[in-house]
Image: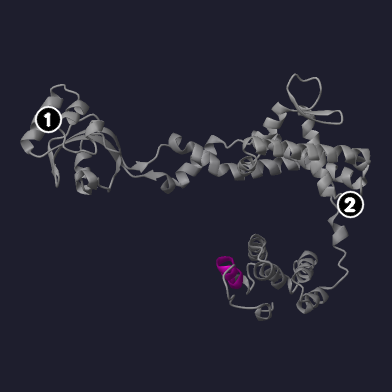
């Protein structure tokens, strides 16, 4: 096979073929739909791989013709894989390194999923503390759910109410005598109405709803008048406004706290692992300071390429964190990310770091402005306008 095959293409072939082995082989009783050399592709495995496709791809390969087209795709990949093996590409150093990189990422991801995410726990005390500190997030408006019978006169309402209080089923009476066509067939059942709202389709304004909220769940109201007539109402369910119970929002709080707790758990595990493996890092190798602060600052100001300028400013802050130009250099790192590279996340991190490291700098107000307005057109200043420290 020609060396013109790219590493990316070979990776695709190798990975696809590596999965295939689960669905190939002459020992299966399943129907064989294709054979490439000594490798068999079974119908059940073909269907399995099609089911794993994303929805848009499943649409592309829908129907018998689509299934056959997808089968030919699998055959093409197997042909390429076998040819690549025959040519010895599985031993190519670049292929081996690429496969090792894939394996490395997959193993790390599996460790993180099982060793970090699956073992992260949000303690009850954290949940309770969040609930107490953020009670405004868990306030709810009261609501009421009810059935009603709508009739044209007070006398008819009194009669309907007497029947219900006498033991007749409220829903049955509503189906028989109510004139509200929207709820009559449902036994007068209304959807829940939130406190402060009305039910205009039934002729009930917010004040009417407040009146029926005076009764408890299970009680039948006195006849009440609205613009549509007279109502007899039975309260099915009533919830007062106020703070939702903790158990009702516990899962919501846990989901909110989980990312930060996972990060903390990860940092703890990582620290323990570093200690157990005796990790040592020699940062002094990178602090040789081959260039002076003034030289780096001058190079950054005279360089047009934003990435090169970014490197000069970063080297200055790294080697001379307490230098005369350190605060301005840190500010310019954020400015370049925001205004020239449109990397707003990196810019936010740089400006925030600048405010933390140099809180007394005259550039802090400018950093605040950038944090609030980055991404908008027409920035208020250019690099040449930055105040020197």
Quarter of the image where one finds residue 95: top right
On the rendered structure, is 74 left or right of 61? right
Residue 114 in sight in this render: yes
Return the residue nearer the eye: 246 or 141.
141
**Span shown in magenta:** 365-374
Q: Position of residue 242 (x, y in %)?
A: 35, 43
State the mark number for residue 4.
2
- The secondary structure type at the circle numbered 1 is helix
Pick the quarter of the image with the N terminus.
top right
Return the residue nearer the eye: 119 or 13.
13
Q: Does residue 204 lie above or below 20 as drawn? A: below
Q: Spatial distance from mark 2 to mark 1, Cα to Cα?
A: 88 Å
Q: Furthest-left residue in view?
A: 155
User: What is the magenta segment's predominant secondary structure?
Assistant: helix
On the rendered structure, is 53 left or right of 270? left
Q: Position of residue 173 (x, y in %)?
A: 17, 28
Q: Position of residue 99 (x, y in %)?
A: 84, 42
- Determine the residue positioned at 7% across, 39% down: 153
State the mark number for residue 35.
none
Q: Furthest-bottom residue in view?
A: 384
State the mark number for residue 160.
1
- Compare marks 2 and 1 and give the one earlier in the sequence: 2
Q: Disc 2 vs disc 1: Cβ atoms closer than 8 Å?
A: no
Residue 370 magenta-drawn? yes
On the rendered structure, is 146 left or right of 152? right
- Determine the residue positioned at 65% across, 44% down: 264
């Amino acid at each position: 096979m020609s060396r013109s095959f790219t590493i990316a293409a070979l990776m695709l072939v190798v990975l696809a073929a590596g999965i295939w082995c689960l669905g190939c082989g002459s020992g299966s009783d399943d129907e064989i739909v294709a054979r490439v050399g000594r490798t068999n592709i079974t119908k059940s495995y073909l269907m399995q791989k099609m089911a794993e496709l994303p929805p848009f791809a499943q649409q592309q390969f829908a129907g018998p013709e689509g299934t056959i087209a997808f089968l030919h795709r699998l055959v093409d990949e197997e042909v390429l894989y076998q040819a690549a093996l025959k040519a010895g590409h599985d031993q190519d150093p670049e292929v081996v390194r690429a496969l090792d990189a894939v394996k490395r990422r997959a193993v790390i991801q599996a460790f993180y999923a099982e060793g970090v995410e699956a073992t992260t726990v949000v303690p009850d005390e954290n949940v309770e503390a969040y609930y107490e500190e953020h009670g405004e997030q868990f306030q709810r408006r009261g609501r009421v759910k009810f059935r009603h019978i709508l009739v044209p006169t007070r006398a008819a309402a009194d009669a309907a109410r007497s029947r219900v209080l006498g033991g007749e089923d409220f829903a049955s009476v509503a189906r028989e005598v109510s004139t509200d066509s929207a709820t009559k067939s449902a036994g007068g059942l209304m959807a829940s109405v939130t406190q402060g709202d009305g039910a205009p389709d039934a002729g009930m304004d917010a004040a009417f709803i407040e009146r029926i909220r005076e009764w408890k769940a299970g009680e039948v109201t006195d006849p009440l008048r609205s613009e549509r007539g007279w109502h007899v109402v039975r309260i099915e369910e009533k919830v007062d406004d106020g703070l939702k119970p903790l158990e009702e929002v516990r899962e919501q709080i846990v989901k909110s706290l989980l990312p930060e707790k996972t990060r903390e758990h990860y940092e703890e595990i990582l620290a323990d692992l570093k200690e157990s493996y005796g990790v040592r890092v020699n940062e002094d190798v990178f602090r040789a300071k081959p260039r002076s602060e003034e030289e780096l600052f001058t190079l950054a100001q005279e360089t047009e390429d934003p990435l090169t300028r970014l490197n000069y400013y970063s080297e200055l802050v790294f080697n001379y964190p307490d230098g005369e130009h350190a605060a301005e250099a840190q500010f310019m790192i954020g400015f370049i990310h925001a205004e020239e590279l449109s990397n707003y996340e990196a810019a936010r991190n740089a400006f925030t770091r600048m405010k933390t490291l140099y809180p007394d700098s005259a550039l802090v107000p400018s950093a605040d402005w950038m944090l609030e307005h980055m991404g908008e057109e027409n920035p208020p200043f250019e690099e040449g306008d930055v105040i020197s420290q």
